[in-house]
Image: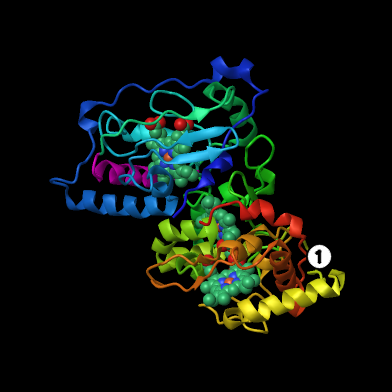
Amino acid sequence: MRIGVRIAIGAVVLAALAIAVVLSMQPGALPPKPAQEQAARPAGATNAETLLIQKGEYLARAGDCVACHTNPEGKEFAGGRPMPTPFGALYSPNITPDEETGIGQWSSDEFYRMMHSGVSRDGSLLYPAMPFASYTKVTRADSDAIYAYLMSVQPVKQKNRPHELRFPFNNRELLIGWRTLYFKEGEYQPDPKQSEQWNRGAYLVEGLGHCAMCHTAINALGGSKESKEFEGGMIPNQNWYAPSLTSNREAGLGDWELKDIADLMQVGVSKRATVYGPMAEVVYNSLQYMTDADAEAMAVYLKSLPKRDADPLPTSQARLVQPSVMESGRKIYEQQCSICHGSDGKGHPPSYPPLAGNTSITMASPVNSIRMVLNGGYAPGTKKNPRPHGMPPFSHILDDDEVAAVVTYIRVAWENSGAPVEPAQVPELRKLLPE
Ligand code: HEC
Ligand code: HEC
Ligand code: HEC
């Protein structure tokens, strides 16, 4: 699986702001941890400790810590995963309980301060590539469970690799500017007007799930725009588009059945669509492990997100397409695609997703569909769908005009409301490696 870049997302900061405020706001290091707090290691663990560790393992999955803190060829949680950002590469740190190179000397207080405030043990400010802007919503009790779990995993001696950020982004003090603009510290506050289930879903989506890290437009400063939460955006350095979760023209889930939303997250495929690219990675590492109750709670919350665009969906844009392009797209579709997705575009869900009425194809950005056609892909293998069906790559069969024609075709056929795609949009994406 490929990395992610998820990272990049929150990635860094901006230069101009802030130097002036730096010193006064820099939080200090906490005192070293008292000896009796030395963590619970599993040897001789009591029942209560075992339960706490299990809870922590589940929550760490919900937070997808493993995705960033494990190098594909390396040991679990030992860090070293490169994360390209527009400002240079970050390398995730070792979060195994090794005393010297990991977090073995951290106390649960220090760990909670890191989750809640984005401040490391020595007092330095963390880059928002570590999603503390979401994790700040995590309760103290849940943070302690994750801590207990991490302290129970195999310690790995592996020094952290220094980040390779360009000047001035290598100066952590500039983060104060970013924090002032984009970071609101605070645990999740339940909304008393909503059900317990809704609040559980909101807690997971806004907190550990850190969905906003990808599903929020990135502004020029590298921060997630809070007022635009869940409105979607391009993931920097990855060239994938994370659709809006609030727009019914993108992945707005308002008219989805709860079961289909929960399936999409937990199973990776659903009657409405499948996940692919970076979202497949999120399902693979994290969401497939959610209990049925938590997957449903998240679905309830996601379905309730307010729609930001009330206009009715536009109707088919087929009239905007040159007839010769339409005909070429239709022919390619019949020859190469209809066997799985059907001449009527209805697919054979959940194995082969429908393309007709699928907002992930008609949304304004055609980037994801172009990449799927070039590189193909697999839905993630999950507990509930261990052998997902795949889609073959077409980059070696179709030239740029043909890719644009077939993607245009699926965006406008069957009353689909997407706009046509230009061949010039293809070459850039062709250069990217398959996932
Ligand atoms: C999207 C990627 C990403 C995810 C997900 C993520 N981290 Fe991190 N984490 C990072 C990066 C990058 C850093 C280093 C930031 C820096 O150097 O400022 C970091 C820093 C840390 C640190 C500080 C280590 C130190 O030595 O200062 C801890 C502890 C940590 N993460 C724990 C976690 C836990 C626990 C989770 C899951 C709940 C998690 N991380 C999820 C990317 C991630
Ligand atoms: C690493 C970045 C990343 C994170 C984190 C992330 N997503 Fe996604 N998501 C994407 C991308 C990219 C897509 C487009 C690909 C696709 O549709 O599968 C996507 C698609 C989706 C879709 C639309 C699927 C479809 O085909 O209609 C939903 C719904 C969704 N994400 C929900 C979530 C939720 C809920 C979370 C948090 C638990 C989350 N995402 C976290 C990147 C991310
Ligand atoms: C062998 C069967 C097969 C063929 C042939 C095939 N696909 Fe797919 N397609 C799939 C599968 C399986 C998925 C789900 C993959 C995933 O989730 O990563 C998929 C996913 C997609 C998606 C993303 C759907 C979503 O939910 O967002 C698009 C777009 C797509 N295909 C377009 C095409 C086009 C255009 C062609 C012909 C050029 C084609 N496919 C040929 C099996 C196929």
Q: Is residue 364 above or below residue 160?
A: below
- Residue that mark 1 sits on: 311
Q: Quadrant of residue 359?
A: bottom right
Q: Residue at x 39, y 43 (%)?
A: 69
The answer to whether the beta carbon of the residue marked 1 is less than 8 Å from any atom of ligand 2 is no
Question: x, y (%) of residue 56?
Answer: 33, 50
Question: x, y (%) of residue 67?
Answer: 42, 49
Residues in magenta?
A: 137-155
Q: Is residue 55 left or right of residue 351?
A: left
Between 15 and 103, the residue placed more toward the observer is 15
Residue 302 visible somewhere in the drawing = no
Q: What predominant SS class does the magenta segment belong to?
A: helix
| Residue type beneath disc 1 | Asp
Q: Is residue 421 above or below residue 109?
A: below
The chosen color scheme is: rainbow
Which residue is farthest left? 44
Q: Is residue 172 left or right of residue 98?
A: right
Question: Looking at the rendering, in which quadrant would you find the N terminus?
Answer: bottom left
Q: Residue at x 35, y 55 (%)?
A: 58
Question: x, y (%) of residue 227?
Answer: 69, 45
Q: Residue at x 76, y 62 (%)?
A: 421
Question: x, y (%) of residue 205?
Answer: 52, 54
Q: Is residue 237 above or below residue 166?
A: below
Q: Residue at x 66, y 64 (%)?
A: 252
